[in-house]
Image (cartoon, grey):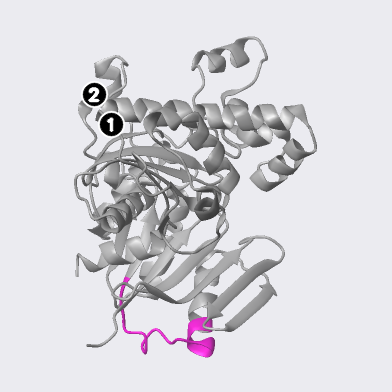
Amino acid sequence: MTTRTVLVINSGSSSIKYQLVDPDSGQALASGLVERIGEETGAIIHKHGQDVTELAEPVADHGAGLSEVLRLFEEKGPTLAEAHVVAVGHRVVQGGKYFSGPVIIDDEVVSTIERLVPLGPLHNPAHLKGIEVGRALLADVPHVAVFDTAFFQDLPEEAARYALNREIADRYEIRRYGAHGTSHQFVSGEVRALLGREDLKQVVLHLGNGASASAVVGRHAVETSMGLTPLEGLVMGGRTGDIDPAAVFHLWRVAGLSIDEIDQLFNRASGMKGLTGDNDMREVWKRVDAGEQEARDAMDIYLHRLTKYVGAYAAVMGGLDALTFTAGIGENDARLRAELCQRLAFLGLEVDDALNGTRSDEARVVSPEGSRAAVLVVPTNEELAIARQALTLL
């Protein structure tokens, strides 16, 4: 059988991440990153096998960036023809109420993604640039959009609808959309396979600079922490997570901050960065160990929010069979996993110190044998998930 690959593109406002994925084997044949697009000097890195190519050169726009990526595939390999690329998969954060799964991109899909920019102002415009450039430069293969919100499209109404005036909410499409759905769907599926059960009640914690929690029963999400936008929910690197909405009115009326300034404050200058000046959890732990009370307080705030969400989701599901950690912090911070499970011991959650302390790139159980609920660490792979979803449409 001829190898089929999917080129996965994640376009940011000034960057392009890409990966050439074999959806059948799960292997990444090549990957790379274009950064600082539009700045005086851009940075490009292309990895293929053991070969790494790094360039420092101006990248005028996304078109120039992707053109350079295609040149590197031809010169450094693997060529896209040899790799038998059958589709290009694009990550799109906000799909609103319109997309419950992957879709072949046409002009109507592009138009809908454009209409959703007010719901995803930080992400959707960048994704649109990547889609436009990708369709122009790789016109001979289908392009597929995979939405971060799709996994949460069928949340129960009691979880998805806010107690906001119904007419206003419906007119302006205000509901819980969630985010990181591609990761939550992939990881929860890996947990079912690893534990050999389809009927699991599980909580997945996607903990990176952006952080979210989901409650998943069987194959369906029943709750998630991010809401209308990725601001709601857990404490994050630079985001507040949950906060009284009246804080906006207060800062506008009393502090004289504009809406844009409050947006910047809540989304980029709060969370762990706002509490400690650092959004790198490794640095925060170093400061905790140095006896800095401010850092310890910030870590306790972070853990308290996690504890509250896991406990609430166990109540929503009527039980808990598995708690899974994923993404950069979730996969690598054994100390955070241990401290959280100590707080959640009443749910039967505990870690085996040796298993939890062993670093690995493999999905694994880190709770003791025979424990009431399983604790797992499962590396997320959104690129593989996007590639596999794209393949289902071909």
Where residue 135 appears, x then y in whole percent?
A: 36, 68
What kind of residue is marked 1? Answer: Gly
Residue range of the region highlighted in magenta in the rendering: 72-87
| Mark 2 → mark 1, Cα distance in angstroms | 18 Å
Q: Is residue 9 left or right of residue 372?
A: right
Q: Name the quarter where the N terminus is drawn.
A: bottom left
- How crowded pointer 2 is (Cα within 10 Å; few <14, some 14-19, many 20+) is rated as few
Q: Residue at label 2?
A: 158
* Along the line of sight, the residue nearer the viewer: 181 or 337: 337
Is residue 320 visible to us here?
yes
Identified at 32% across, 53% down, the residue is 191
Q: Is residue 137 left or right of residue 301?
A: left
Front-most of residues 222 and 356: 356
Residue 348 vs residue 4: left or right? right
Residue 41 marker: none
| Figure quadrant of the C terminus | bottom left
Circle nearer the N terminus (2, 1): 2
Residue 79: percent from left, percent from top: 43, 87
Where is mark 1, residue-wise? 319
Q: Which residue lies at the image location 36% right of the left edge and 85% below the top edge?
A: 83
